[in-house]
Amino acid sequence: MKACALVLLSVLFNIVVVKGQLSDFSGTDFTKADSIAELYPMHPLKDLKVLSDKLTAPLSTDVEKFRSIFKWVCTNIENDYALFLENKNMRAKLKGERLTRWEKNFSTRVFGIMASRHRTICTGYAYLVKELAFHAGMNCRIVNGYGRHARANIGGSGIVNHSWNAIELQGKWYVCDPTWSSGMIDAQNQAYTKKFEDVYFLSEPSLFVRSHFPLDPEWILLNEKPALETFLNAPLVYMASFRFAVEPVAPALFNIDVPRDGHVSFEFTMGSAMTFRDASLYIEDSRAGDSFERHSGDVVTYGAVHKFSRKGTYAVHIVVDGSPVLSYNVRVQ
Amino acid sequence: MKHLNLSNPKCRATVTTSLFAAFILMLATVNQSFSQTASGQTGHLVSGIVKDEKGEAMIGASIYLKGSTEGTTTNADGRFEFPRKLNEGDRLTISFIGYESVEYVVKGDADENIEVVMKVDVIVWGEVAMDNAYTTKPGLRQFFRRIF
């Protein structure tokens, strides 16, 4: 059963990494790059060449230079929640030529606000990283596509809503997301909190593709690419999924239908070097969590079985050390 | 050792030709040295105008020699003149926030007056990071169960 699930998962996601990730630079100490990024708080954006030179000239390797640029952008540019809402609403409202016209004006306004107030939305972050890298002689691209979290791109046909970057370092391509590394919106109080997170810096592509699906599949950076449909219907991942390198094993889909008093087996794997204190399964509306058991084998998996005895629709979360790593939607008939 | 016999007309002609060639070469060298001294450098001037897609002049666009800190910015008419002479193959980067940077390769050896058109080549997307756990929309029965 376990073996079947693993085969199914690998068929669904084909996790054969052919491109780079942060561990390629495990011997690189980013302390100097991070310190240089801290030297220029709120540096003007009028002349990006000047800023790029300041951030990169003292560093010797491209990965350190890129780190300095990435860190500066993430820690000096704030997400503008009002612009985010306007963008979202207008895209839902306008179509065709009117949308194109609005997009042009909106772009100009977004970059104007970024230059004057150091505030933007995701394409602004990706643009800045790309331009600063360009001035430092690096090959960097903006990648547009589908970003997925608890409020976006769950099932359905998908909505293009996000931009991130691909960067070429030592002949290999890597992915990173400066917007999601800069801080986040709290859904409860609708406020942006600035906090640097480096899980989206040169991320492992097979993890990254679970929350970032590019319009051009080339930027998935995997040999064999999952389909958009697979992306939209897979279990939901979180920032902590990256930290613990969590991969879902079973169920393979986000939506699960189960009869009343039916059992569902939840199973996942974790990065081999990861350590944690506690992994639990939490069912929405219930107070206590079920504990996961460790199953040794060729691949170590963690499993828990839950019986659903009441009708309804439930969010089910796998929580590791207090942070959600995977979520499912269970419909009990 | 072979000695030149200047009384021989053939030999005399050869020496005269060689001396003339050496003189021309010397003149050319002196001329080049003089022009280098006068201008301080070789190459030619690159100036131009930077416009947006609507054809409007862009004020404050940056123009740099790639790989260096040498550069200038466009004036109120969108015009610039690079502060020193450039050589064929030198690369200029022209940038302005919100626009795709442009790279221009310096051509030939005559002064150039270029026109650069910068494009806004990005569609702005705006998804934010949200790490809150997923929640369902409860059915009526669940709704009352959650309240009571």
Image (cartoon, coloured by chain):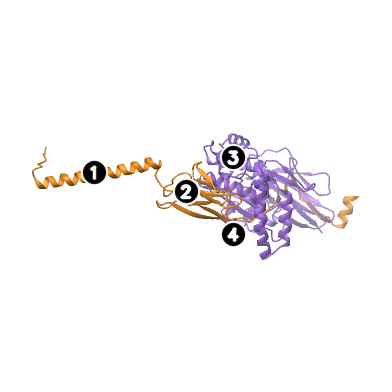
Query: Both on one chain, marks 3 and 2?
Result: no
Query: What is the chain letter for disc 4?
Result: B
Residue highlighted by disc 4? B54
Of badges 4 and 1, the one in the foreground is 1
- Using the image as rendered, state which of residue A251 and residue A199 is in the foreground: A199
Residue highlighted by disc 2? B91
Q: Where A61 sits versus B119, above or below?
A: above
- Using the image as rendered, state which of residue A249 and residue A164 is in the foreground: A164
Residue type highlighted by circle 2:
Arg
- Per the model, the C-alpha gap separating discs 3 and 4 is 35 Å
Residue highlighted by disc 3? A68
- Per the model, the C-alpha gap separating discs 3 and 2 is 25 Å
Q: Where A254 sits versus A74, above or below?
A: below
Which of the chains is purple? A
Residue type highlighted by circle 1:
Phe
Instruction: Please provide percent x and percent y for residue B106.
Output: 44, 51
Residue highlighted by disc 1? B23
Of badges 2 and 1, the one in the foreground is 1
> What secondary structure is found at the residue carrying circle 3?
helix
Residue type highlighted by circle 3:
Ser
- Per the model, the C-alpha gap separating discs 2 and 1 is 38 Å
